[in-house]
Image: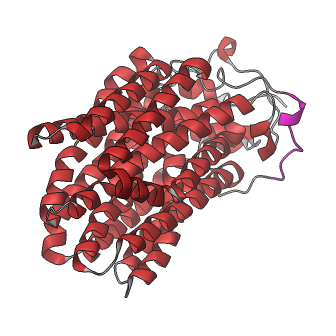
């Protein structure tokens, strides 16, 4: 069967314009409220601890069950996306975590809140798998790095705005309104996203060429492209086939899979350990909740500054070089941070450290789906994030033990060592994905990458 649509090459040649801006905002707003709902844990847990509504042990369980939900959600998103389509999966996850955020606002006890948070985490775990994967499937390779940075900027704004909103809302109204704000915002995005198209790349790979062609023509009209794609640029014909999950661990692919897993484990551990526990550490060291949240909010501005800076440099220096550079930057800042005594220097260093962490997180999560072909791109990203989230399940207890034994110094030094390790690994085994089409990045296929033809892919 010939490749009649050639969706990949046609998407790659589109001029950047209104279509890409629309995709960026629809995807980015979902990640914004994912960040909001995820990050609010640090502020509400600190408030619950101060009021006696919760304890450090219950806070640890809350964060761990969140990570369990995130782990399940990441794996589920990958399978749903490759089997039923990108459009079905991203709407499904938003409905789950938006609805459960509203329910969480009325939790009668910390035990009920923990149960609600688990279900909410399943929805949240899908969003970053979906967000980065959708952007790289729609944006041409010459601009993918910039759009990954802009996507992270929108998502990172959720981290910063959560801290700012919590500074004013929690001391005045308590922690429950934070869940209401996140839930209403998420369901609003769910309604707006009904206009986001299915990925033509995925439709073509599962044999739904008529739908892929219809969507491609609509996208090209929106982008102002009227001339047909020259035959010389057409990709080779490719039969639609269902690729089993075992392909991720086959000889042509396993190096990419293992690299993606290690990158996800370290970038997620570093990110969540810093942003999730910082206000709680400050409270335990004697700060008031209001002072703690304001102090943290100043540093959380790095979640905006970091991705903004990345959007300007990513396509210039390449993803591999940038990952190594900012991993080392994270390690160095983390090493000096515990020894600072001036409040100004602590805030400034914290701001730079969070900026570097945000950049590294964006590069790690953004590069992951670039490593895998369309047939199993989201399962590859989902499996990598699943292991990353799995590594976080016990991390609150690890962080708490390090803090109790060695203080914040022990926590930050552990994170710094992890960043140095990943910098070395990327130097040795990294793959440069910048400025290359997704089809050109695909690994060579072998017999075990093909399964039986899929049963008619469900129409959604």
Residue 411 appears anywhere in the view: yes
Q: Quadrant of the C terminus?
A: bottom right
- Write the residue at 73% across / 57% down: 458
Residue 419 in the image, given as x and y percentages of width and height: 45, 33
Q: Quadrant of the N terminus?
A: top right
Q: Does 403 appear above or below 308?
A: below
Q: Quadrant of residue 105?
A: bottom left
Q: Does 192 appear above or below 453?
A: below
* 454 drawn magenta: yes
Residue 440 in the image, given as x and y percentages of width and height: 65, 20
Q: Quadrant of residue 112?
A: bottom left
Image check: 379 left or right of 283?
right
Residue 81 in the image, given as x and y percentages of width and height: 64, 51
- Write the residue at 64% across / 23% down: 441
Q: Quadrant of residue 107?
A: bottom left
Residue 134 appears anywhere in the view: no
State which region is magenta: 446-456
Q: Of helix, strand and loop, which mostly describes the magenta segment?
A: loop
Q: Does 360 appear above or below 167?
A: above
- Write the residue at 23% across / 56% down: 163
């Amino acid at each position: 069967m010939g490749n009649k649509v050639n969706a990949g090459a046609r998407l790659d040649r589109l001029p950047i314009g209104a279509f890409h801006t629309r995709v960026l905002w629809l995807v980015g707003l979902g990640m914004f409220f994912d960040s909001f709902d995820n990050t609010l844990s640090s502020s509400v847990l600190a408030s619950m601890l101060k009021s006696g509504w919760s304890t450090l042990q219950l806070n640890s369980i809350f964060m761990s069950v969140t990570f369990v939900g995130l782990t399940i959600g990441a794996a589920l998103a990958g399978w749903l996306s490759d089997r039923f389509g990108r459009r079905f999966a991203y709407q499904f996850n938003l409905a789950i975590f938006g609805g459960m955020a509203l329910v969480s606002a009325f939790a009668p006890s910390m035990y009920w809140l923990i149960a609600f948070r688990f279900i909410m985490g399943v929805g949240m775990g899908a969003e970053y798998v979906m967000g980065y994967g959708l952007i790289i499937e729609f944006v041409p390779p010459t601009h993918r790095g910039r759009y990954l940075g802009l996507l992270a900027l929108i998502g990172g704004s959720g981290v910063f705005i959560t801290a700012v909103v919590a500074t004013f809302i929690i001391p005045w109204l308590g922690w429950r309104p934070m869940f209401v704000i996140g839930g209403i915002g998420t369901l609003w995005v769910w309604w707006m996203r009904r206009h986001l198209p299915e990925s033509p790349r995925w439709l073509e790979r599962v044999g739904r060429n008529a739908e892929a062609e219809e969507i491609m023509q609509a996208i090209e009209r929106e982008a102002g492209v009227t001339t047909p794609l020259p035959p010389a640029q057409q990709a080779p014909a490719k039969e639609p086939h269902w690729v089993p999950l075992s392909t991720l661990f086959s000889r042509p692919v396993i190096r990419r899979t293992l690299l993606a897993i290690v990158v996800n484990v370290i970038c997620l551990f570093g990110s969540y350990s810093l942003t999730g526990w910082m206000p709680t550490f400050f409270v335990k060291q004697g700060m008031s909740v209001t002072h703690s949240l304001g102090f943290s909010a100043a540093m959380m501005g790095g979640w905006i500054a970091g991705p903004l800076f990345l959007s300007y440099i990513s396509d210039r220096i390449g993803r591999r070089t940038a990952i190594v550079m900012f991993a080392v930057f994270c390690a160095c800042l983390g090493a000096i941070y515990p020894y600072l005594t001036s409040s100004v220097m602590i805030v400034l260093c914290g701001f730079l450290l969070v900026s570097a962490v945000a950049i590294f997180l964006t590069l790690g999560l953004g590069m992951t789906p670039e490593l895998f072909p369309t047939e199993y791109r989201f399962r590859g990203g989902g499996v990598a994030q699943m292991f990353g989230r799995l590594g976080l399940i016990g991390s609150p207890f690890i962080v708490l033990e390090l803090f109790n034994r060695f203080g914040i110094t022990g926590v930050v030094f552990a994170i710094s060592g992890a960043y140095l390790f990943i910098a070395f690994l990327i130097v040795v085994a990294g793959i440069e994905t910048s400025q290359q089409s997704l089809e050109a990045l695909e690994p060579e296929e072998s017999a075990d990458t093909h399964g039986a033809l899929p049963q008619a892919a469900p129409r959604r």
